[in-house]
Amino acid sequence: MKAWGKVRTELVKKLARELVERFPDKFTTDFENNKKLVDTFTNISSKKLRNRVAGYITQLQNQKKQNKLTNEQK
């Protein structure tokens, strides 16, 4: 049985995708680094929202990294 993922609002996903699209070489798989970058590139005043965006960016970067590894193995 597959575990259910965490639910994220469309706002978090949209902000994260836009930031990754604008600054593709800045974000990494490190949450702390991404948190600082989100703080720098946006004017999000809510710490909770900033952390959720940074967490989703981290997840996207991990997925991208995982996809590259599987494509290289083929």
Image: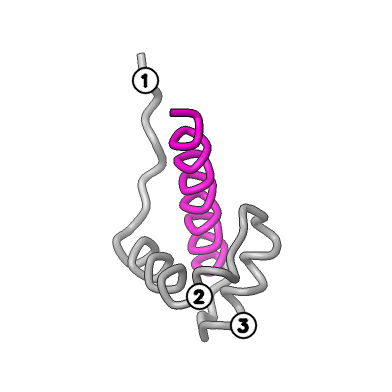
Closer to us: 9 or 64 = 64
The answer to if 56 sits in the magenta stretch is yes
* Quadrant (top left, top right, bottom left, bottom right) of the N terminus: top left
Tell me the element at label 2. Answer: loop
Instruction: Please tell me whether mark 1 or mark 2 is closer to you in this view.
Output: 2
Q: Amino acid at mark 1?
A: Lys
Q: CA distance from mark 3 to mark 2?
A: 12 Å
Relative to 6, 33 lies left or right: right
According to the picture, the residue beneath numbered tag 3 turns out to be 40
Identify the mark nearer the N-term, 3 or 1: 1
Q: How is the image coloured?
A: one colour
Q: Which residues are magenta?
A: 48-74
Q: CA distance from mark 3 to mark 1?
A: 36 Å
- Residue at 38%, 72% (x, y): give it: 18
- Residue at 39%, 36% (x, y): give it: 5
Q: Amino acid at mark 3?
A: Thr
- Residue at 57%, 62% (x, y): give it: 51
The answer to if 73 sits in the magenta stretch is yes
Q: Quadrant location of residue 15?
A: bottom left
According to the picture, the residue beneath numbered tag 2 turns out to be 23
Main SS of residues in magenta: helix
Farthest-out residue, top: 1
Kindly indicate whether the residue at mark 2 contacts the one at mark 1 (C-beta within 8 angstroms). no
**Mark drawn on residue 2:** 1
Q: Amino acid at mark 2?
A: Phe
